Image (cartoon, helix red, strand yellow):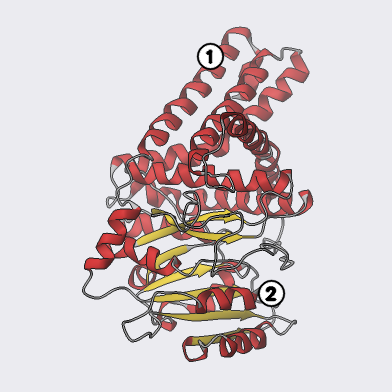
Amino acid sequence: MGFLASGHRSGKLVALATAGVAIGCAVPVAVATRWPPISPESAAEALDAAATPPTFTVLVGARDEAKVLPRLVRDVAGQSYRSATGEPLFELIVVDDRSLDGSGQVVAAAAREFGIERVTRVIRREGDGLPDGKGAALTAAQPDVCRGDVVLVLDADARIEPCFLRRAAGYFAAGANAVTARRRILDADIGWLAGAQADEQNMDGELNRGRWAMGGCSEFRGNGIMIRRELLAAAGGWRAAALTEDIDLSSRVAALTGERVAWALDAEVWEEPVRSLSGLWQQRLRWAEGGFRRAFEHGPAVISSTRLSARSRLDFVAYVGQLAVPAVVAGAAAAAVVTGRKRSLVALLAGYLGVSAGLGWDALRWERRADGRALGGAERARRSLRVSLFNGFWLAVVPRALLNIALRGGPVRYEKMAHDGAGGAGWDYSVGAPGDADPEQAAGGPWRG
């Protein structure tokens, strides 16, 4: 289709059609975010009224994560979500996936230090030739191993505030069976790359929140997956072959049960940014390839599911269809080189980046400065432009992922992101999240509401 853009007439049609579809999808999603099915306030009210609050299994897959695991254990131990007698309404399970740095021992020591040894378990995953990856690690803790009503998946570098579980529980008390947390980036102010990732997460979160609000086929995001244990079991548990376990599970749950994923605005998970372009390239290649594999493996079942509404199935098709845009742009670029006609390529790029900037601008309404005030127009515009340019990265990543799928021989290689433990050096969970100068007033931070 991109090659069609080389002609004067067809080029205009392709550019107009692409822009029309993009705007036609983006505007309703942005509007829908204003009216979520479950608001933070209604979630809190539902939990207060619940006769039996849901319990949690906090599940972490970790391989050589001794640098960051003690911080996470401390955050879990600091949760205020407890019974009237002070007993934790949660347990912690860490899957030690063949670590060589003593990750399992570090978890056990931290659990003793912070007083949650009784509700902490370490499961050692061992063996030769085992598949790599987070999804594969989680198979060591299938639903029958978990004791909580809800399974919460966190990455080893995650940071959560003391009220995280209480806020998350409200969504389940309000009727949700699958929820994803709002992902935030630590140290977003240290450089362009980290800041762009932070704004990308804001935009992606708003996109999924809008899809959920308008009845679409909303999805999990890997750090902060929350799902009722029975629903996880009904969907077949964790799959070792899943390259991207979050969207893989989302599609299986949707196709089999018709459940859509709620998006929790006030339950925030903070994580380290990818600190290098090479690391970002490897991570996004995995995400893109996982997106394609999800579409191939589960797309037909989602589209034909009688448990999903027509709106949900159409939303799934439209969302997966994003993967075609970089291929269209690549075709237009090739045609521009061959024919010398660049107008249509410029129009396609402008449409792609313009829609990204618009979604980024809308998502930034939640962001606050260190003093708790809303972002000024100039800063909001600058950050919208930054995230738009950052999204241009996908124009190179997606075609390369397609080539990998077409040409690779043998199993998929999982590139693990390295965590250095330096993220969130200023975090003090008894005071506030990084960047929240005044937790009582920081409307964009976790103490809102």
Residue 373 or residue 156, whichever sits in front: 373
Q: Is residue 156 visible?
A: yes
At 50% from the left and 68% from the top, the residue drawn is 153
Q: Residue tagged by mark 1?
A: 13
- Up-down relation of residue 254 to residue 35 (above or below): below
Residue 373: percent from the left, percent from the top? 52, 42
Please tell me whether mark 2 sits on a helix, a strand or a loop. Answer: loop
Query: In front of the other: label 1 or label 2?
Result: 2
Q: Is residue 175 visible?
A: no
Q: Image quadrant of residue 26? A: top left
At 49% from the left and 58% from the top, the residue drawn is 268
Q: Looking at the picture, which amino acid does disc 1 mark?
A: Leu
Residue 354: percent from the left, percent from the top? 58, 26
Q: Residue tagged by mark 2?
A: 65
Q: Image quadrant of residue 11? A: top right
Residue 433: percent from the left, percent from the top? 57, 60
Residue 344: percent from the left, percent from the top? 64, 16
Q: Looking at the picture, which amino acid does disc 2 mark?
A: Glu
